[in-house]
Amino acid sequence: MMTRRFLSRLRLATLGILLALSAVSPATADEGWHDLHEAVRDGRIVPLPDILDWLEAHYMGQVLEVELERDEGWMRYEVEMLGPQGQVVEFEFDATNGELIGMEGVNINGMRRGK
């Protein structure tokens, strides 16, 4: 059974991806959305809920924004979170394997669970 919190995170993440796709032409956005679903279905990229579940297990905070970036064939998720002390931290994940590849922000340790 899906919790309200999970559904809220999923809606926010979907909105972030839709907003990112809306910045391109409608034809390109349609192709991008189709390509994204195909990449997840074929296992070429990790589903976004897996990334969000990992973050929830390891860090406290609320997701503010999610972007899927494509650079020279390399795809990565960028997730911006608001921490319990008001800090904003951006987490960067390799979309192909879900590995955390970078973080930037202030007081990141203040967001860690199980310190």
Image: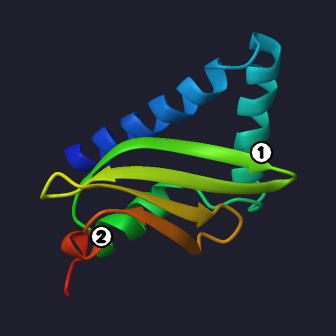
Q: Hey, which residue is sitting farthest right in the picture?
A: 72
Q: Residue at x 79, y 39 (%)?
A: 35
Specify whether 92 is left or right of 62.
Answer: right
Q: Hey, which residue is sitting farthest top in the picture?
A: 26
> Taking 87 as reference, is 17 above or below it?
above
Using the image, tell me which numbered label, if any, was put on residue 108. Answer: 2
- Residue 28 location, x and y as percent? 81, 21
- Residue 66 location, x and y as percent? 48, 44
- Residue 43 location, x and y as percent? 74, 62
Q: Residue at x 22, y 64 (%)?
A: 60
- Residue 86 location, x and y as percent? 16, 51
Residue 47's quadrant in the figure?
bottom right
Q: Residue at x 59, y 69 (%)?
A: 98
Residue 99's quadrant in the figure?
bottom right
Along the line of sight, the residue nearer the viewer: 45 or 66: 66
Whole-angstrom CA distance, mark 2 to mark 1, is 34 Å
| Sequence-wise first label, 2 or 1 | 1
Residue 33's quadrant in the figure?
top right
- Kind of residue at badge 1: Glu
Using the image, tell me which numbered label, if any, was put on residue 38. Answer: 1
